[in-house]
Image (cartoon, rainbow, N blue to C red):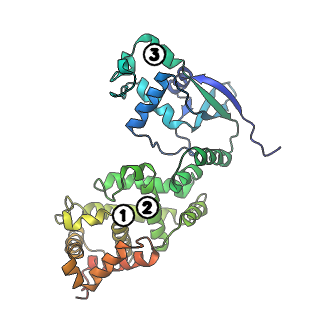
């Protein structure tokens, strides 16, 4: 069968993997690899699994042999396991304090007795070698592996499937948000961040810059990634605008009314509210009506104080409309547009209906 993937298998020890790692011959982060999603408890549990001699799932590698005979490997599936192993060997963390192996509790690899270290080095994994160099096939293999063995989010699957212009931009801009804005803005639970929900929001913000506020199903977002994978007409302008908006928001959050996010304005950290603020700044930049950060911060703080107070909100239809649009079906295009319209007027200092 011409379309059948020919693969081979072998057993390899931790010593073999570590030797490749030390010589820089194993790549843990090929384009189709997912984000590391293991917390410390998972790492410790996996190391305990090895020390107990229990079996672990196969590791999938793409092997590349050069003309001089040098072999290097991309990790298609198994990054979290190998990363935990390398970090444990290098002393990044010890055996868990509550490990079943009482004599090793709290011990770093270098402190474990020699016999146990030898057993650790000789622990074997089943290795599946994937011979193809076709990235599309490798992405598909990775996608299928994880659909079968892990409940990945659609965004994690997009990360595995796409490594083009738009995917790289979304992840780069996510890093920009993390470095330029205060911690927790916008807010994501730790698990959501590990599942790349922050990247999913940033992707939607880039699409907002390109086409205005929209609602995206997961299938529609995947299509947007696909359409911009090899060619993205608005790449330069969208990323430039995104960077400028984040710079403005960074300045905005340093203004007195918003510093440390007192209770009335804390809601701006919510994803729906942040989307609204981001979209409003985009609109006002395009219309050349963006006020200074100091003016915008004071106006926003005053408005959010009204939104957060039921009695005051009831006296201002615009505040009530914003509150309702953020509370239900908040990702609907109509609701997003309604919120952005209100916040744009707030930032400009327009008089809102009483």
199 vs 230, left or right, is left
| Mark 3, residue position | 117
* CA distance for labels 1 and 3: 47 Å
Residue 110 is situated, as x and y percent measured from the top left of the image, at: 38, 17
**Would you call the spot at circle 2 few (<14 residues within 10 Å), some (14-19), or many (20 or more)?**
some
Q: Which residue is mark 2?
A: 201
- 79 vs 348: above or below: above
Residue located at (55% from left, 25% from top): 17
Residue name at image x 35 percent, y 73 percent? 326
Secondary structure of residue under mark 1: helix
Instruction: Determine whether the residue tagged by mark 2 lies in a helix, strand or loop.
Output: helix
Residue that label 1 marks = 271
**Residues tagged 2 and 1 counted as in contact (Cβ below 8 A):** yes
Outermost residue on the bottom side: it is: 353
Measured in 3D between alpha carbons, the distance from the residue under mark 3 to the one under mark 2, in whole angstroms, is 44 Å
Please indicate whether residue 38 sits to the left or right of residue 259 in the image.
Answer: right
For residue 181, say whether it is visible.
yes
């Amino acid at each position: 069968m011409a379309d059948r993937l020919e693969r081979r298998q072998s057993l390899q020890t931790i010593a073999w993997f570590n030797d490749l790692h030390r010589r820089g011959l194993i790549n843990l982060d090929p384009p189709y690899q997912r984000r590391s999603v293991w917390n410390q408890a998972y790492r410790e549990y996996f190391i305990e699994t090895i020390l107990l001699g229990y079996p672990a799932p196969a590791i999938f590698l793409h092997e590349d042999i050069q003309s001089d005979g040098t072999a290097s490997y991309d990790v298609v599936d198994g990054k979290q396991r190998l990363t935990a192993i390398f970090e444990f060997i290098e002393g990044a963390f010890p055996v868990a304090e509550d490990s079943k192996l009482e004599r090793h509790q709290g011990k770093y690899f270098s402190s474990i007795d020699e016999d146990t270290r030898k057993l650790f080095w000789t622990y074997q994994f089943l290795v599946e070698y994937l011979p193809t160099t076709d990235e599309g096939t490798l992405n598909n293999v990775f996608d299928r592996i994880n659909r079968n063995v892990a409940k990945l989010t659609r965004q994690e699957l997009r990360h595995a499937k796409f490594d083009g212009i738009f995917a790289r931009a979304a992840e780069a801009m996510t890093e920009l948000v993390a470095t330029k804005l205060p911690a927790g803005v916008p807010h994501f639970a730790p698990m959501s961040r590990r599942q790349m929900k922050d990247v999913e929001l940033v992707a939607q913000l880039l699409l907002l810059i390109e086409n205005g506020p929209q609602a995206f199903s997961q299938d529609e977002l995947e299509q947007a990634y696909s359409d911009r994978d090899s060619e993205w007409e608005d790449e330069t302008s969208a990323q430039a605008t995104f960077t400028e908006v984040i710079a403005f928001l960074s300045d905005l959050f340093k203004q007195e009314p918003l510093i440390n996010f007192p209770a009335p304005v804390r809601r701006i950290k919510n994803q729906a509210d942040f989307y609204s603020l981001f979209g409003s700044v985009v609109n006002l930049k395009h219309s050349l009506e963006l006020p200074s950060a100091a003016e915008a911060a004071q106006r926003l703080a005053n408005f959010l104080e009204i939104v957060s107070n039921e009695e005051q909100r009831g006296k201002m239809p615009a505040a009530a409309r914003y509150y309702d649009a953020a509370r239900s079906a908040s990702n609907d295009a109509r609701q997003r547009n309604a919120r952005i319209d209100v916040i744009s007027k707030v930032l400009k200092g327009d008089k809102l209906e009483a």
